[in-house]
Amino acid sequence: MPGAGDGPASLSHPYLLFNWSSLHLWIPVLVLKTIKCKAAVCWKPNSPLIIEEIEVAPPRDHEVRIKIIATGICRSDEHVLSGELTYVKFPIILGHEGAGIVESVGSKVTGIKTGDRVIPLIVPQCRKCRCCLNPESNLCCKNVFGNCDGAMNSDCTIFTCRGQGVYNFLGTSTFSEYTVVEEDSVAKIDANAPLDKVCLIGCGFSTGYGSAINTAKVRPGSSCAVFGLGGVGLSAIIGCKVAGASKIIGIDINTDKFTKAKECGATECINPKDYDRPIHEVLAEKTDNGVDYAFEVIGNIKVMVS
Ligand SMILES: NC(=O)c1ccc[n+]([C@@H]2O[C@H](COP(=O)([O-])OP(=O)(O)OC[C@H]3O[C@@H](n4cnc5c(N)ncnc54)[C@H](O)[C@@H]3O)[C@@H](O)[C@H]2O)c1
Ligand SMILES: [Zn+2]
Ligand SMILES: [Zn+2]
């Protein structure tokens, strides 16, 4: 992704037109133009992402256009690439773990302005619906998970590539130099926040940390097992540690993950391949018949059942 000061290949900056109908009355009208930039386009499942020149439409009412500075890769992007998420439509621009700078805002946008540093959100926060008003939930009724044909996903008018509309992913599509997001799906962040690090808050960190702190409500002194030590698993470990768990066991078939897991707070790491019996039996032995909290962070139903 380009640096903050770079411009896109053919960005026409917004400019002001003046209404000359009356010499005494000048009415400024903001005209935003389509941007041409680069994006990683996924044309069909099980095929590589292609870096393409795309067109990004101007933001409409209640939308903002963001220059993406950094983006992470979540395993959920890979689930789309491998064709496992069958409801997703192609071609699509994936990526949902980004951070950037607001390039322009559509009309009726009130809380965000050009130049703000932001994280696009896969779960909007309208702050008005019954879920947003419920302190036990943050799954805003405008979320696209239950309605994958929801407004932005089925709307091919934001991105165009080779004359064809390209689908948006989870209302964010951060594998693009520019993206358009609804105002409710943007969190304004500190102007000094390092965008290459805070982008992880867009999915992996919030998912893992939140599952320990908000969903499981891990208690001090408890024992926890975290299956899968990727971005989400490491964040779950951090959550367990912050919650005061005294035993945090990281489990992964890739031993290279253990050093980072211990830095994040795992008290012990084990590799199921080192044992000739089911891993839940190993855990039961280590924890007086089982852990208090178990987190499945691989995406493997068999592990969840075990
Ligand atoms: N809100 C959500 O529901 C949400 C958000 C983010 C990610 N996810 C899902 O969470 C899962 C993890 O995401 P991630 O980005 O951290 O993935 P990742 O690929 O970075 O990490 C997965 C880890 O699991 C390990 N692993 C694979 N098979 C294993 C096995 N049989 N036993 C033990 N370890 C095994 C891998 O070695 C890897 O370290 C994915 O399925 C992703 O789709 C869900
Ligand atoms: Zn994700
Ligand atoms: Zn809401």
Image (tube, rainbow, N blue to C red):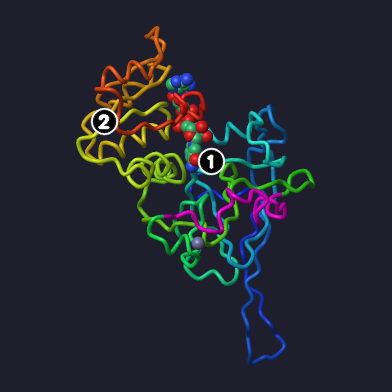
- Indicate yes or no whether the magenta region holds residue 152: yes
Which amino acid type corresponds to the residue marked 2 in the rendered image?
A: Ser
Q: Is 130 in front, or is 267?
A: 130
- Answer yes or no: disc 2 within 8 Å of ligand 1: no
Range covered by the magenta-colored residues: 137-159
Which quarter shows the C terminus? top left
Above or below for 53 versus 16: above
User: Which residue is the site of mark 2?
Assistant: 223
SS at badge 1: loop
Residue 26, by quadrant, is bottom right
Residue at 59% across, 46% down: 173
Q: Main secondary structure of the magenta part?
A: loop
Q: Is residue 191 visible?
A: yes
Above or below for 28 versus 195: below
Q: Is 282 in front, or is 96?
A: 282
Q: Is residue 72 visible?
A: no
Residue 66 screen position, x and y as percent: 55, 54
User: Which residue is the site of mark 1?
Assistant: 1
Which amino acid type corresponds to the residue marked 1 in the rendered image?
A: Met
Residue at 45% across, 60% down: 116
Q: Which mark is residue 258?
A: none
Residue 8 screen position, x and y as percent: 61, 49
Q: Earlier in the sequence, mark 2 or mark 1?
A: 1
